[in-house]
Amino acid sequence: MYAQKCITPDGVQLLLKLRADPKNIFVKMSAYDAYLFTDSQISRINNEQLFVSISYWGRNVSGNPIIQIRNAAVPMPTYSEMLEAGAFGY
C-alpha cells in the first residue's frame, strides 16, 4: 500500500494505492478523510513498516461513506458486528 496527501482545488486529499491481487487499486479519499493518517503513519506505510486493512461498508443515512480502517494485525469486524455497533443506522 502507498499513501500520499495532496493539495487539490477541493482542499487536502488522501490518495491510497491498495494491493488487491492481481491488480492494484487507486482510491481518492474524501477531504473529510484526508487526516486519517498522520505524516509519520504515511511514512511508515510507504516504507512497509505499517500495514492497514481498509473496507468499504456502504453509505450511512446521510450519504457519507462508511469506511473501516485498522492495523492489519487486528481483525476486521463482521457485518453483524458493524450492525450491532449501529454503524449503518438504517
Image (cartoon, grey):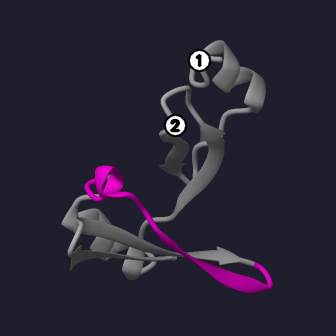
The local secondary structure at tag 1 comes to loop
Tag 2 near tag 1, CB within 8 Å: no
Residue type at mark 2 is: Gly
Q: Residue shown at 42%/62% (left/top)? A: 29
Instruction: Answer above or below: position of 68 versus 17.
Output: above
Q: Say the numbered circle drawn on residue 24.
A: none
Instruction: Answer above or below: position of 67 versus 31.
Output: above
The local secondary structure at tag 2 comes to loop
Reading the image, the residue beneath label 2 is: 63
Left or right, residue 13 beside residue 21: left
Asked whether 56 falls inside the magenta stretch, the response is no
**Few, some or many C-alpha atoms within 10 Å of disc 2 (few <14, some 14-19, many ≥20)?**
few
Reading the image, the residue beneath label 1 is: 89
Q: Earlier in the sequence, mark 2 or mark 1?
A: 2
For the residues carrying marks 2 and 1, which lies nearer the camera in this image?
Answer: 2
Residue positioned most to the bottom: 23
Instruction: Answer above or below: position of 33 versus 40.
Output: above
Q: Residue shown at 61%/24% (left/top)? A: 88
Q: Residue shown at 53%/45% (left/top)? A: 67
Question: Residue 52, image x and y in percent?
Answer: 52, 59
Q: Residue shown at 50%/48% (left/top)? A: 69
Asked whether 23 falls inside the magenta stretch, the response is yes
Q: How many marks?
A: 2
Quarter of the image with the C terminus is: top right
Which residue is nearer to you in this view: 46 or 32? 32
Magenta stretch, residue numbers: 21-35
